[in-house]
Amino acid sequence: MRNSRGSIMRPDPLPLSASHPVVTPLSPSVVYASETPDALDDQYEGRVQGYTYSREGHPNADVVAKRLDAMEGMPGGVVTSSGMAAVSAVVLGLLSAGDHIIGANQLYGRSLRLMKDDLPRLGITTTLADPGDVQAVKRDIRPETKMILVEVVSNPTLCLADIKGLSLLCREKGILLVVDNTFTTPRGFKPFDHGADIVIHSITKLLAGHSDVMLGYAVARDPAINDQMRVFAITTGMTPSPFDCWLAERGMLSFELRFDRAQETAALLADHLAGLPGIKRVLYPLRDDHPDHALAADLLGVSGCNMVSFELEGGRAAANIFTREAEGLNFAPTLGDVGTTLSHPASSSHRALTTAERAALGLGEGFFRVSVGLEAPELLLSVFTNAVAAATS
Ligand SMILES: *Cc1c(COP(=O)(O)O)cnc(C)c1O
């Protein structure tokens, strides 16, 4: 009908089919046309479900949100254009000038930067504390403290936050406990079962899993908080691209298999590295020589996750040889990819710190964090054996 009037502006609807596609269609349309103003009223008043403008929501984002809602066991989550957009939707969407937030002292680098540089500029005061030490966190609480932001397992020393203790503290004081569950994933840890109020993900990492998508997600226990975050995300344009959501959904279909495989290999790699000459120390939460082993076993059970850190003897010179000799492994600042990636905090995530500050965290020039991928375990272990030998002999 429409095209018979010669209009090329309005495409015909998709051809009808009694059968349905097995893959979610990609919906890149920015706008959605309604039949009449009355029909639009019905939509805005919530009497019927429909989309209007994709900054406010689109089918591919909703598909990803529903999947993550199911994984975290909480409805109403918001998908954002990156993990940092999700962190910002939580912190900037919920806090106001005069409020105070306590952040974990080893948060993801950009989250730390938000805490140190941006929030104070907006009149939100911040304090960093050790999330494994509930008494220390308690001492930093003020009357205006509204939120505590932690990651379950820290980067890159893989220290554990005392989530149970923090959630009791937050309940007692009426403070929101926000857990960035990116490293641990809903497969390894369920923050809402341990008293979290809000959960954040960088979908970019393990959930999407292929280093070809940037997306984030945040969900709160309280539906009113979800609404507040959603409105802020829409107003500030944190909208995800339909194509990224479409790719993320595809990645998430294999997430559990990938995660299980990667963490099994990570446990093998940790034990293997610990037995190699030239390795000063290995950090893996489930090994009994990890400083937070008891807390890790309590919170994570058998799920040690896919991150392993270790320190090579020989400092920067050995580190340079190691990345060059680690055949087939990318030296790249990300994690959760299908392939194993190596991160060297002294030259990347922690380069802004002084040598003394890095030393206080145990991050010498020989320190590496490994995000274990899906390579055949025997092959991966032999790559490490050879690269460590080349670097430290
Ligand atoms: C990567 C990451 C983020 C930020 O996510 P992006 O998608 O890169 O913006 C936040 N928190 C943690 C723990 C991360 O690893």
Image (spheres, grey):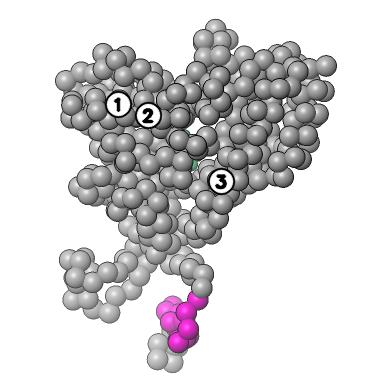
> Which image quarter: residue 313?
top right
Q: Main secondary structure of the magenta part?
A: loop
Measuring 31% from the left and 14% from the top, which residue is drawn there?
136
- x and y percentages locating residue 228 in the rendered image: 24, 46
Q: Give the label, 3 or 1, closer to the camera.
A: 3
Quadrant where the N terminus sits is bottom left
**Where's the C terminus, which quadrant?**
top right
Mark 3 lies within 8 Å of ligand 1 (Cβ measured): no
Gap in angstroms between the C-alphas marked 1 and 2: 10 Å
Counting residues from the N terminus, which is met first, the one under dot 2 or under dot 3?
Answer: 2
Residue 114 tag number: none
- In the rendered image, the residue lying farthest to the top is 356
User: Between tags 1 and 2, which lies in front?
Assistant: 1
Distance in Å between CA atoms under marks 3 and 1: 28 Å
Residue located beneath label 3 in the image: 260
Q: How crowded is mark 1: few (under 14 residues within 10 Å), some or many (20 or more)?
A: many
Identified by mark 3, the residue type is Asp
